[in-house]
Image: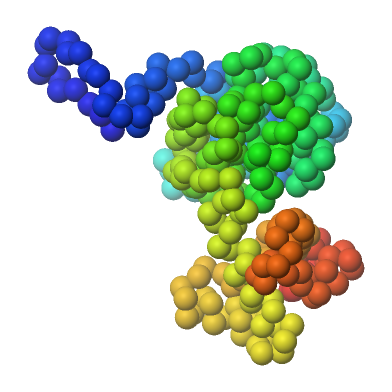
Amino acid sequence: MLSVSATMRKPIAVRPVNKMFAAYFSTTSAKLFKNVTILGGGLMGNGITQVTAAAGYNVTMVDVNQELLNKSTANIEKTILRGYKKAIESGKMDEASAKAKKDDIMSRIKGMVSAEEAAKDADLVIEAVPENIALKQKIFGSLDLVAPQHCVFASNTSSLKIVDIQATSKRADRFAGVHFFNPVPVMKLLEVVRGPNTSEDTFQKLVEYGQKVGKTTVDCKDTPGFIVNRLLVPAIFEAIRLVERGDASKEDVDTAMKLGAGHPMGPLALADMVGLDTCKNILDGWHATYPDVELFQPSPLVNKLVSEGKLGKKSGEGFYKY
Protein backbone atom coordinates (compact mmCIF):
# COMPACT_ATOMS: atom_id res chain seq x y z
CA MET A 1 0.00 0.00 0.00
CA LEU A 2 1.26 3.49 -0.82
CA SER A 3 1.31 5.97 2.05
CA VAL A 4 2.46 9.49 2.82
CA SER A 5 4.11 10.38 6.12
CA ALA A 6 1.98 12.47 8.46
CA THR A 7 4.95 14.77 8.98
CA MET A 8 4.96 15.89 5.36
CA ARG A 9 3.23 19.27 5.14
CA LYS A 10 3.75 20.28 1.54
CA PRO A 11 1.92 18.44 -1.24
CA ILE A 12 4.16 16.84 -3.81
CA ALA A 13 3.58 16.14 -7.47
CA VAL A 14 3.53 12.45 -8.25
CA ARG A 15 4.09 11.19 -11.76
CA PRO A 16 3.17 7.53 -12.33
CA VAL A 17 6.22 5.80 -13.75
CA ASN A 18 4.54 2.74 -15.20
CA LYS A 19 1.15 1.16 -15.91
CA MET A 20 0.86 -0.45 -12.50
CA PHE A 21 1.15 2.90 -10.67
CA ALA A 22 -1.04 4.63 -13.24
CA ALA A 23 -3.76 2.05 -12.57
CA TYR A 24 -3.43 2.59 -8.83
CA PHE A 25 -3.91 6.35 -9.02
CA SER A 26 -6.82 6.08 -11.47
CA THR A 27 -8.79 3.56 -9.39
CA THR A 28 -8.43 5.09 -5.96
CA SER A 29 -10.70 7.93 -7.06
CA ALA A 30 -13.13 5.68 -8.94
CA LYS A 31 -16.81 5.74 -7.96
CA LEU A 32 -17.43 3.14 -5.28
CA PHE A 33 -20.35 0.70 -5.25
CA LYS A 34 -23.38 1.57 -3.15
CA ASN A 35 -26.28 -0.48 -4.52
CA VAL A 36 -25.64 -4.17 -5.25
CA THR A 37 -28.06 -6.55 -6.96
CA ILE A 38 -27.66 -10.30 -6.40
CA LEU A 39 -29.30 -12.58 -8.95
CA GLY A 40 -30.33 -15.88 -7.37
CA GLY A 41 -31.39 -16.53 -3.78
CA GLY A 42 -30.04 -20.05 -3.46
CA LEU A 43 -27.21 -21.22 -1.22
CA MET A 44 -24.57 -19.02 -2.85
CA GLY A 45 -26.87 -16.09 -3.59
CA ASN A 46 -28.16 -15.67 -0.06
CA GLY A 47 -24.64 -16.04 1.33
CA ILE A 48 -23.36 -13.29 -0.97
CA THR A 49 -26.38 -11.17 -0.04
CA GLN A 50 -25.63 -11.61 3.67
CA VAL A 51 -21.96 -10.64 3.57
CA THR A 52 -22.65 -7.73 1.21
CA ALA A 53 -25.36 -6.26 3.43
CA ALA A 54 -23.21 -6.84 6.53
CA ALA A 55 -20.50 -4.72 4.89
CA GLY A 56 -22.90 -1.79 4.60
CA TYR A 57 -24.06 -2.06 0.98
CA ASN A 58 -27.72 -1.76 -0.04
CA VAL A 59 -28.64 -5.15 -1.49
CA THR A 60 -31.47 -6.28 -3.75
CA MET A 61 -31.79 -10.06 -3.95
CA VAL A 62 -33.64 -11.43 -6.97
CA ASP A 63 -35.33 -14.81 -7.35
CA VAL A 64 -38.08 -16.24 -9.53
CA ASN A 65 -40.94 -15.90 -7.02
CA GLN A 66 -41.79 -14.41 -3.64
CA GLU A 67 -41.92 -17.81 -1.91
CA LEU A 68 -38.25 -18.47 -2.72
CA LEU A 69 -37.33 -14.95 -1.65
CA ASN A 70 -39.06 -15.46 1.70
CA LYS A 71 -37.21 -18.74 2.19
CA SER A 72 -33.87 -17.11 1.35
CA THR A 73 -34.51 -14.21 3.70
CA ALA A 74 -35.38 -16.60 6.54
CA ASN A 75 -32.19 -18.55 5.87
CA ILE A 76 -30.10 -15.38 6.03
CA GLU A 77 -31.66 -14.40 9.37
CA LYS A 78 -30.93 -17.86 10.82
CA THR A 79 -27.35 -17.80 9.55
CA ILE A 80 -26.68 -14.37 11.05
CA LEU A 81 -28.00 -15.40 14.48
CA ARG A 82 -26.09 -18.69 14.31
CA GLY A 83 -22.93 -16.67 13.72
CA TYR A 84 -23.52 -14.81 17.00
CA LYS A 85 -24.26 -17.97 19.00
CA LYS A 86 -20.74 -18.43 20.41
CA ALA A 87 -20.52 -14.77 21.41
CA ILE A 88 -23.85 -15.09 23.26
CA GLU A 89 -22.81 -18.32 24.98
CA SER A 90 -19.50 -16.80 26.10
CA GLY A 91 -21.21 -13.72 27.46
CA LYS A 92 -19.59 -11.34 25.00
CA MET A 93 -22.97 -10.46 23.50
CA ASP A 94 -26.54 -10.68 24.76
CA GLU A 95 -29.48 -11.85 22.67
CA ALA A 96 -30.91 -8.35 22.35
CA SER A 97 -27.65 -7.06 20.83
CA ALA A 98 -27.49 -10.02 18.45
CA LYS A 99 -31.05 -9.33 17.31
CA ALA A 100 -30.29 -5.63 16.84
CA LYS A 101 -27.24 -6.44 14.69
CA LYS A 102 -29.30 -8.92 12.67
CA ASP A 103 -32.06 -6.36 12.15
CA ASP A 104 -29.51 -3.78 11.04
CA ILE A 105 -28.14 -6.13 8.37
CA MET A 106 -31.61 -7.20 7.24
CA SER A 107 -32.68 -3.55 6.90
CA ARG A 108 -30.31 -3.24 3.95
CA ILE A 109 -31.77 -6.26 2.11
CA LYS A 110 -34.85 -6.22 -0.09
CA GLY A 111 -36.21 -8.84 -2.45
CA MET A 112 -37.55 -8.53 -5.99
CA VAL A 113 -38.78 -10.95 -8.63
CA SER A 114 -37.82 -8.74 -11.58
CA ALA A 115 -34.12 -8.71 -12.41
CA GLU A 116 -34.62 -5.82 -14.81
CA GLU A 117 -36.22 -3.63 -12.12
CA ALA A 118 -33.55 -4.59 -9.60
CA ALA A 119 -30.76 -3.63 -11.99
CA LYS A 120 -32.03 -0.13 -12.84
CA ASP A 121 -30.30 1.53 -9.87
CA ALA A 122 -27.47 -0.98 -9.40
CA ASP A 123 -23.79 -0.10 -9.25
CA LEU A 124 -22.86 -3.79 -9.21
CA VAL A 125 -24.79 -6.87 -10.36
CA ILE A 126 -23.58 -10.28 -9.19
CA GLU A 127 -25.11 -13.31 -10.87
CA ALA A 128 -25.38 -16.51 -8.80
CA VAL A 129 -27.73 -18.70 -10.85
CA PRO A 130 -27.12 -22.34 -11.88
CA GLU A 131 -24.12 -23.15 -14.10
CA ASN A 132 -25.99 -22.89 -17.39
CA ILE A 133 -24.24 -20.75 -19.98
CA ALA A 134 -27.40 -20.03 -21.99
CA LEU A 135 -29.25 -18.88 -18.86
CA LYS A 136 -26.42 -16.60 -17.78
CA GLN A 137 -26.09 -15.10 -21.25
CA LYS A 138 -29.84 -14.46 -21.44
CA ILE A 139 -29.83 -12.71 -18.06
CA PHE A 140 -26.92 -10.43 -18.83
CA GLY A 141 -28.19 -9.67 -22.32
CA SER A 142 -31.47 -8.36 -20.92
CA LEU A 143 -29.87 -6.48 -18.01
CA ASP A 144 -27.42 -4.76 -20.35
CA LEU A 145 -30.36 -2.80 -21.76
CA VAL A 146 -31.56 -1.41 -18.41
CA ALA A 147 -28.60 -1.22 -16.02
CA PRO A 148 -26.81 2.16 -15.68
CA GLN A 149 -23.78 2.59 -17.92
CA HIS A 150 -21.42 2.67 -14.94
CA CYS A 151 -22.83 -0.58 -13.52
CA VAL A 152 -20.37 -3.47 -13.28
CA PHE A 153 -21.53 -7.00 -14.11
CA ALA A 154 -19.97 -9.99 -12.33
CA SER A 155 -20.62 -13.72 -12.39
CA ASN A 156 -20.14 -16.08 -9.47
CA THR A 157 -19.48 -18.94 -11.90
CA SER A 158 -17.13 -21.60 -10.61
CA SER A 159 -16.25 -23.14 -13.97
CA LEU A 160 -17.58 -21.27 -17.01
CA LYS A 161 -15.45 -18.77 -18.91
CA ILE A 162 -16.17 -15.11 -18.30
CA VAL A 163 -15.58 -14.28 -21.97
CA ASP A 164 -18.41 -16.66 -22.91
CA ILE A 165 -20.85 -15.42 -20.26
CA GLN A 166 -20.36 -11.77 -21.27
CA ALA A 167 -20.91 -12.46 -24.97
CA THR A 168 -24.44 -10.98 -24.89
CA SER A 169 -23.35 -7.86 -23.04
CA LYS A 170 -21.93 -4.67 -24.53
CA ARG A 171 -19.92 -3.81 -21.42
CA ALA A 172 -17.00 -6.24 -21.68
CA ASP A 173 -14.73 -3.76 -19.90
CA ARG A 174 -17.16 -3.68 -16.95
CA PHE A 175 -17.55 -7.45 -16.72
CA ALA A 176 -15.60 -9.89 -14.53
CA GLY A 177 -15.89 -12.92 -12.28
CA VAL A 178 -16.25 -12.95 -8.49
CA HIS A 179 -16.06 -16.55 -7.34
CA PHE A 180 -17.16 -16.97 -3.71
CA PHE A 181 -16.86 -20.24 -1.81
CA ASN A 182 -19.44 -22.18 0.18
CA PRO A 183 -20.46 -21.36 2.88
CA VAL A 184 -19.98 -17.72 1.88
CA PRO A 185 -20.14 -16.16 5.38
CA VAL A 186 -17.40 -18.54 6.59
CA MET A 187 -15.00 -19.04 3.67
CA LYS A 188 -12.44 -16.24 3.48
CA LEU A 189 -11.38 -16.43 -0.18
CA LEU A 190 -12.72 -14.56 -3.20
CA GLU A 191 -11.33 -15.23 -6.67
CA VAL A 192 -11.59 -12.06 -8.76
CA VAL A 193 -11.45 -13.15 -12.39
CA ARG A 194 -10.28 -10.91 -15.21
CA GLY A 195 -11.97 -11.52 -18.53
CA PRO A 196 -9.89 -10.70 -21.61
CA ASN A 197 -11.49 -7.24 -21.81
CA THR A 198 -11.97 -6.47 -18.10
CA SER A 199 -10.62 -3.00 -17.38
CA GLU A 200 -8.17 -2.34 -14.57
CA ASP A 201 -10.70 0.06 -13.07
CA THR A 202 -13.36 -2.69 -12.91
CA PHE A 203 -10.90 -5.20 -11.47
CA GLN A 204 -9.75 -2.83 -8.72
CA LYS A 205 -13.33 -1.94 -7.79
CA LEU A 206 -14.14 -5.64 -7.35
CA VAL A 207 -11.00 -6.22 -5.30
CA GLU A 208 -12.05 -3.38 -3.00
CA TYR A 209 -15.57 -4.80 -2.80
CA GLY A 210 -14.16 -8.22 -1.91
CA GLN A 211 -12.03 -6.77 0.85
CA LYS A 212 -14.96 -4.78 2.24
CA VAL A 213 -17.07 -7.95 2.53
CA GLY A 214 -14.27 -9.55 4.54
CA LYS A 215 -12.56 -11.69 1.93
CA THR A 216 -8.96 -12.18 0.90
CA THR A 217 -8.88 -11.71 -2.86
CA VAL A 218 -6.71 -13.42 -5.44
CA ASP A 219 -6.20 -12.32 -9.04
CA CYS A 220 -7.28 -14.97 -11.58
CA LYS A 221 -7.16 -15.20 -15.33
CA ASP A 222 -10.12 -16.52 -17.31
CA THR A 223 -8.96 -20.15 -17.41
CA PRO A 224 -10.95 -23.33 -16.62
CA GLY A 225 -11.73 -23.42 -12.90
CA PHE A 226 -9.61 -20.33 -12.20
CA ILE A 227 -7.25 -21.36 -9.34
CA VAL A 228 -9.04 -23.38 -6.68
CA ASN A 229 -11.35 -25.50 -8.83
CA ARG A 230 -8.69 -26.04 -11.50
CA LEU A 231 -6.64 -27.80 -8.81
CA LEU A 232 -9.45 -29.20 -6.68
CA VAL A 233 -11.89 -30.71 -9.18
CA PRO A 234 -9.31 -32.86 -11.05
CA ALA A 235 -7.97 -34.01 -7.66
CA ILE A 236 -11.47 -35.05 -6.57
CA PHE A 237 -12.01 -37.01 -9.78
CA GLU A 238 -8.60 -38.67 -9.53
CA ALA A 239 -9.67 -39.91 -6.09
CA ILE A 240 -12.96 -41.15 -7.57
CA ARG A 241 -11.06 -43.01 -10.29
CA LEU A 242 -9.05 -44.83 -7.61
CA VAL A 243 -12.36 -46.12 -6.26
CA GLU A 244 -13.72 -46.91 -9.74
CA ARG A 245 -10.64 -49.03 -10.54
CA GLY A 246 -10.87 -50.83 -7.21
CA ASP A 247 -7.47 -49.54 -6.13
CA ALA A 248 -8.87 -48.36 -2.78
CA SER A 249 -12.17 -48.00 -0.96
CA LYS A 250 -13.80 -44.60 -0.58
CA GLU A 251 -13.24 -44.78 3.17
CA ASP A 252 -9.52 -45.50 2.77
CA VAL A 253 -9.06 -42.76 0.17
CA ASP A 254 -10.64 -40.21 2.49
CA THR A 255 -8.75 -41.43 5.55
CA ALA A 256 -5.44 -41.37 3.64
CA MET A 257 -5.88 -37.77 2.53
CA LYS A 258 -6.98 -36.60 5.98
CA LEU A 259 -4.18 -38.27 7.92
CA GLY A 260 -1.48 -38.32 5.24
CA ALA A 261 -1.98 -34.92 3.62
CA GLY A 262 -3.54 -33.02 6.52
CA HIS A 263 -6.78 -32.31 4.65
CA PRO A 264 -9.77 -31.48 6.89
CA MET A 265 -11.93 -33.91 4.93
CA GLY A 266 -11.35 -36.52 2.25
CA PRO A 267 -11.98 -35.84 -1.45
CA LEU A 268 -15.07 -38.05 -1.72
CA ALA A 269 -16.67 -36.52 1.36
CA LEU A 270 -15.82 -33.12 -0.11
CA ALA A 271 -17.48 -34.06 -3.41
CA ASP A 272 -20.61 -34.96 -1.44
CA MET A 273 -20.53 -31.59 0.30
CA VAL A 274 -20.02 -29.66 -2.95
CA GLY A 275 -22.72 -31.70 -4.67
CA LEU A 276 -22.06 -34.50 -7.15
CA ASP A 277 -24.24 -32.77 -9.73
CA THR A 278 -22.12 -29.63 -9.40
CA CYS A 279 -18.90 -31.64 -9.74
CA LYS A 280 -20.31 -33.41 -12.78
CA ASN A 281 -21.44 -30.18 -14.44
CA ILE A 282 -18.03 -28.60 -13.98
CA LEU A 283 -16.17 -31.56 -15.44
CA ASP A 284 -18.66 -32.03 -18.28
CA GLY A 285 -18.19 -28.40 -19.29
CA TRP A 286 -14.42 -28.70 -19.29
CA HIS A 287 -14.56 -31.99 -21.20
CA ALA A 288 -16.76 -30.46 -23.89
CA THR A 289 -14.23 -27.67 -24.40
CA TYR A 290 -11.07 -29.75 -23.94
CA PRO A 291 -12.03 -33.32 -24.93
CA ASP A 292 -8.43 -34.55 -25.17
CA VAL A 293 -7.38 -33.60 -21.64
CA GLU A 294 -7.23 -36.81 -19.62
CA LEU A 295 -7.95 -35.13 -16.29
CA PHE A 296 -11.25 -33.80 -17.69
CA GLN A 297 -12.66 -37.21 -18.67
CA PRO A 298 -16.13 -37.91 -17.17
CA SER A 299 -16.60 -40.38 -14.33
CA PRO A 300 -19.02 -43.28 -14.91
CA LEU A 301 -19.53 -43.64 -11.16
CA VAL A 302 -20.45 -40.00 -10.66
CA ASN A 303 -22.74 -40.11 -13.71
CA LYS A 304 -24.51 -43.13 -12.21
CA LEU A 305 -24.98 -41.56 -8.78
CA VAL A 306 -26.31 -38.31 -10.25
CA SER A 307 -28.75 -40.19 -12.51
CA GLU A 308 -30.07 -41.94 -9.38
CA GLY A 309 -30.59 -38.62 -7.62
CA LYS A 310 -27.74 -39.29 -5.18
CA LEU A 311 -26.24 -35.81 -5.24
CA GLY A 312 -24.41 -35.87 -1.92
CA LYS A 313 -25.19 -34.23 1.39
CA LYS A 314 -28.00 -32.04 0.03
CA SER A 315 -30.00 -35.08 -1.15
CA GLY A 316 -29.16 -37.29 1.82
CA GLU A 317 -26.90 -39.67 -0.09
CA GLY A 318 -23.92 -39.56 -2.43
CA PHE A 319 -20.78 -41.54 -1.83
CA TYR A 320 -21.96 -41.63 1.79
CA LYS A 321 -25.38 -41.56 3.47
CA TYR A 322 -26.38 -38.55 5.59
Residue 289, compared with residue 123, is above or below; it is below
- Residue farthest right in this picture: 308
Residue displayed at 69% across by 47% down: 160
Residue 230 appears anywhere in the view: yes
Residue displayed at 76% across by 69% down: 298
Q: Of residues 312 and 156, which is closer to you in this image?
A: 156
Give percent across and percent down for residue 193.
55, 41
Residue 183, compared with residue 140, is above or below; it is below
- Colouring method of the image: rainbow
Residue displayed at 79% across by 63% down: 311
Give percent across and percent down for residue 44.
67, 43
Residue 253, compared with residue 166, is above or below; it is below
Q: Of residues 200 and 126, which is closer to you in this image?
A: 200
Give percent across and percent down for residue 124.
61, 24
Residue 233, by quadrant, is bottom right
Q: Of residues 116 and 48, which is closer to you in this image?
A: 116
Residue 50 appears anywhere in the view: no
Residue 130, compared with residue 125, is above or below; it is below
Quadrant of the image for the C terminus?
bottom right
